[in-house]
Image (cartoon, rainbow, N blue to C red):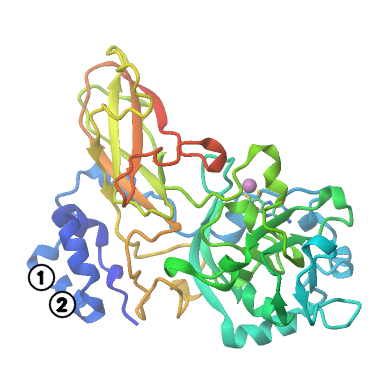
C-alpha cells in the first residue's frame, strides 16, 4: 500500500504552498507517485537549513500510550492497584463487567426493560464487548485535552464500540434524556468520577462527528490500565473529563441536566474542543540579525483551523491599549505542515489502521487539518536588532475567528494567546 505522504511532503509545501497541497491531497497514491517524478517536486534546496532542522525535530503526530500525560483522581489511583487487586475489582479484560441501569430516583426513572446488572448475570463483559465490536467497532483520531491544562495530554487513534449499541441492549423505551457514567472508584462514593451526555448525542452523530465510544484500544493496542483500560468512554468533541476511565457503570436517566463531577470547580461541562496554537520550539536567546526557526502545534477544535499566525513585539514599543487579544499586532502566516510521512504513536506496522474514520484506503487524511485533532506549524523569523521581545502565536478558525475568540473563557478550555519573552543580543 503506497501512501502519498511517504514522499517529502514538507518540501512540497515549502515550494508550492497551499494550492499544491490541495492538489496533492486530491491525487491519490498513483497520482502522487507520478508527481514525485515531476521536476517541480524536487524539494529541499529552498528551505533555510535552520527551518528544515527545526521541522525535522517536531514531535510525532500521535503519542504513544505511555507518553500521554495522566489526569487521574483516586486514592489510590486505580491504575496503581496491584494486579491481583485489579483482577478482583474488574479492572482487567478477564474480569471487567459493565452495569447499565435505570436511575432509581422516582422523579428521573426511565422506562428500561432489560437493565444489565451483575446481580441478574447479564452485565456486559469483555467477551460481550468484543462480540459487539465484530459488527460495530470504529476508530478515529482524537486529541485528549483537559480543559484546565494549557496543552493536550496526548493524541491518538481510539477504537471502540459506540455506547448506543450497549444502551440498546437494555431495551430502553421512553423517558430517557441523559446518560451518566462512572468508573471504578475504590468503592468510595466520594471518589466517584462521573460524566454525562444528552441521550441525543449518544444515539446520533451530528455533522460527521465520530460516535461516543466504549474505547478498548489506543493506537492499535489494548488500552492500558493507565489510560483507563480495560474500557473507558471517549467522547470525540468533548474535553477530557467526559472521557471517563475504568468504566464500570452507566445510568440511564430522565434527568434533564448534567451533574458531572467536573461541574464542580467552575468547569463548563458543555464545552466542545477549541482551536488554539502553542509553541514547541520557541525563541530564547537569539543572535542579532540572524533569522531563526520557530515551530509549534495547534489543537484543531470543532471549528477547524484555517491559519496559524505569529508575531513579534519589541518590548521597547508600547502595546496598544484596549487590545487584550493583540488583534492589532503585525501577524504573519506560519506554514501549516502537511500530513506527516511517519505518524508516530507506535501504530501497528507504522501505518494508519484500516477503516479509521477520516482516512482514505491509502491511509491519507480526507481533510487537512483534521478536526478534533492537531497540526504542526513552522516559521522562519527574520533576524532582529538587539533588544527584548515577545513572540506570540494564534489560530484563525474556519469561521474566521482569531484565537481566543469566539470562546475566550478559560474554564471551557484554555486558549489564551501564548506569549514568550526572548532576548536578542
Ligand atoms: N475515572 C476517571 N476518569 C477520568 C478522570 C479521573 O480522574 N477518573 N480524569 C478525567 C480528566 S479530568 C481528563 S482530562 C482525562 C485525562 O485522560 P488521560 O489521563 O488518559 O490523559 O481523563 C478523564 N477521565
Ligand atoms: Mo481534565
Residue tagged by mark 2? 34
State whether residue 21 is above or below residue 4. Answer: above
Closer to us: 364 or 42: 364
- Residue furthest left in the image: 39
Closer to us: 300 or 420: 300
The residue at the point 35 percent across, 31 percent down is 392
Whether residue 209 appears in this view of the structure is no
Identify the secondary structure beneath mark 2: helix
Is 17 placed left or right of 108 in the picture? left
State whether residue 209 is above or below residue 153. Answer: below
The residue at the point 87 percent across, 52 percent down is 189
Cα distance between the residues tagged 2 and 1: 7 Å
The residue at the point 45 percent across, 58 percent down is 372
Q: Residues within 10 Å of mark 1 (few under 14, many from 20)?
A: few
Is 301 placed left or right of 164 in the picture? left
Of the 4 image quadrants, the one containing the C terminus is top left
Closer to us: 28 or 382: 28
Which quadrant of the view contains residue 325?
Answer: top left
Which quadrant of the view contains residue 279?
Answer: top left
Residue tagged by mark 1? 38
Where is residue 339 shown, x and y percent of the image?
33, 62
Q: Residues within 10 Å of mark 2 (few under 14, many from 20)?
A: few
Mark 2 and mark 1 in contact? Answer it, CB < 8 Å.
yes
The residue at the point 67 percent across, 87 percent down is 131
Of the 4 image quadrants, the one containing the N terminus is bottom left
Identify the secondary structure beneath mark 1: loop
Amino acid at each position: 500500500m503506497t501512501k502519498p505522504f511517504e514522499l517529502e511532503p514538507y518540501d512540497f509545501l515549502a515550494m508550492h504552498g497551499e494550492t499544491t497541497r490541495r492538489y496533492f491531497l486530491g491525487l491519490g497514491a498513483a497520482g502522487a507517485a507520478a508527481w514525485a517524478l515531476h521536476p517541480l517536486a524536487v524539494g529541499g534546496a529552498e528551505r533555510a537549513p535552520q527551518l528544515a532542522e527545526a521541522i525535522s525535530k517536531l514531535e510525532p503526530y500521535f503519542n504513544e500510550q505511555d507518553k500521554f500525560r495522566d489526569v487521574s483522581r483516586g486514592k489510590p489511583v486505580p491504575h496503581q492497584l496491584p494486579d491481583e487487586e485489579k483482577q478482583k475489582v474488574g479492572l482487567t479484560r478477564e474480569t471487567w463487567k459493565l452495569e447499565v441501569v435505570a436511575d432509581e430516583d422516582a422523579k428521573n426513572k426511565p422506562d428500561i426493560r432489560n437493565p444489565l446488572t451483575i446481580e441478574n448475570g447479564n452485565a456486559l463483559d469483555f467477551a460481550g464487548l468484543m462480540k459487539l465490536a465484530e459488527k460495530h467497532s470504529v476508530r478515529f483520531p482524537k486529541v485528549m485535552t483537559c480543559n484546565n491544562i494549557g496543552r493536550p495530554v496526548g493524541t491518538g487513534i481510539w477504537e471502540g464500540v459506540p455506547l448506543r449499541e450497549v444502551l440498546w441492549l437494555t431495551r430502553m423505551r421512553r423517558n430517557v434524556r441523559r446518560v451518566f457514567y462512572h468508573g471504578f472508584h475504590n468503592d468510595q462514593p466520594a471518589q466517584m468520577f462521573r460524566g454525562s451526555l444528552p441521550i441525543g448525542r449518544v444515539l446520533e452523530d451530528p455533522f460527521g462527528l465520530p460516535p461516543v465510544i466504549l474505547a478498548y484500544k489506543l493506537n492499535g493496542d489494548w488500552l492500558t490500565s493507565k489510560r483507563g483500560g480495560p474500557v473507558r468512554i471517549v467522547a470525540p468533541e468533548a474535553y477530557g473529563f467526559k472521557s471517563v476511565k475504568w468504566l464500570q457503570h452507566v445510568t440511564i436517566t430522565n434527568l434533564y441536566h448534567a451533574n458531572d463531577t467536573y461541574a464542580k470547580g467552575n468547569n463548563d461541562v458543555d464545552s466542545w474542543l477549541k482551536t488554539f496554537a502553542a509553541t514547541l520550539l520557541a525563541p530564547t536567546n537569539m543572535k542579532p540579525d540572524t533569522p531563526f526557526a520557530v515551530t509549534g502545534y495547534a489543537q484543531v477544535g470543532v471549528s477547524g483551523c484555517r491559519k496559524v499566525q505569529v508575531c513579534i513585539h519589541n518590548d521597547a514599543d508600547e502595546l496598544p491599549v484596549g487590545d487584550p487579544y493583540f488583534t492589532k499586532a503585525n501577524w504573519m502566516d506560519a506554514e501549516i505542515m502537511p500530513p506527516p510521512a511517519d505518524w508516530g504513536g507506535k501504530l501497528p506496522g507504522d501505518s494508519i489502521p484500516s477503516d479509521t474514520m477520516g482516512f482514505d484506503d491509502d491511509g491519507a487524511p480526507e481533510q487537512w487539518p483534521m478536526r478534533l485533532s492537531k497540526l504542526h506549524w513552522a516559521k522562519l523569523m527574520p533576524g532582529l536588532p538587539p533588544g527584548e521581545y515577545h513572540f506570540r502565536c494564534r489560530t484563525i478558525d474556519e469561521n474566521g475567528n482569531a484565537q481566543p475568540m469566539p470562546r475566550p473563557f478559560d474554564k471551557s478550555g484554555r486558549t489564551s494567546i501564548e506569549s514568550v519573552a526572548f532576548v536578542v543580543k
